[in-house]
Image (spheres, rainbow, N blue to C red):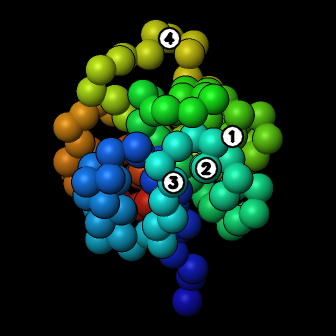
């Protein structure tokens, strides 16, 4: 039996984070959570089985979600990235190669479609 994809949800709003964790869990992923990009980097340093990150852009801490996406791409190039925001729409070239952007509010369908597009899920 194949292991479920391990996905890190990074969102500073606790209710939105909980909703995202529920969505990815319902899609068959094993979800980890962090409320800041700094916490996410610490978790990625310790948990080597994470295959994807779903991160908001606007967060407190030393780096935001775009910074996290780029750090993850440099340090863990095997990790796939989905960036979400209701406030920003990153310009071409801002996201790391292969990353997907979706706008808030997100639906389970948009999350499923994005995770499929980066190869984490099969539709």
Badge 2 vs badge 3, beta-carbon distance below 8 Å: yes
User: CB atoms at circles 2 and 1 under 8 Å apart?
Assistant: no
- How many C-alpha atoms fall within 10 Å of the one at disc 4: few (<14), some, or many (≥20)? few
In the picture provided, is 19 more to the left or to the right than 31? left
Q: Secondary structure at mark 1?
A: helix
Task: Out of 101 and 65, give the one closest to the viewer.
Answer: 65
Tag shown at residue 39: 2
- Displayed quadrant of residue 98: top right
User: How far apart, in angstroms, are the residues tagged by discs 1 and 3?
Assistant: 14 Å
Circle nearer the N terminus (2, 4): 2
Q: Residue under label 4, please give it.
A: 92
Do the numbered discs 1 and 4 sit on residues whose CB atoms are within 8 Å?
no
The nearer-to-camera label among 4 and 3 is 3
Disc 3 crowd rating (10 Å Cα; few below 14, some 14-19, many 20+) is some
State the CA–CA distance, disc 2 to disc 4: 27 Å
Residue 122 visible in this rendered orientation of the protein: yes
Residue 51 x %, y %: 61, 58
Q: From this viewpoint, is residue 120 visible?
A: no
Q: Which mark is residue 103?
A: none
């Amino acid at each position: 039996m194949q292991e479920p994809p391990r996905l890190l949800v990074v969102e500073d709003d606790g209710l939105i984070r909980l909703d995202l964790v529920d969505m990815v869990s319902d899609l068959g992923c094993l979800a980890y959570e962090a409320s800041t990009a700094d916490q996410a980097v610490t978790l990625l340093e310790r948990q080597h089985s994470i295959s994807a990150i779903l991160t908001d852009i606007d967060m407190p801490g030393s780096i935001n979600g775009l910074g996290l996406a780029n750090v993850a791409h440099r340090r863990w190039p095997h990790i796939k990235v989905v960036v979400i925001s209701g406030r920003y729409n990153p310009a071409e070239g801002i996201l790391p190669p292969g990353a997907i952007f979706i706008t808030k509010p997100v639906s389970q369908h948009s999350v499923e479609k994005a995770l499929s597009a980066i190869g984490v899920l099969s539709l």
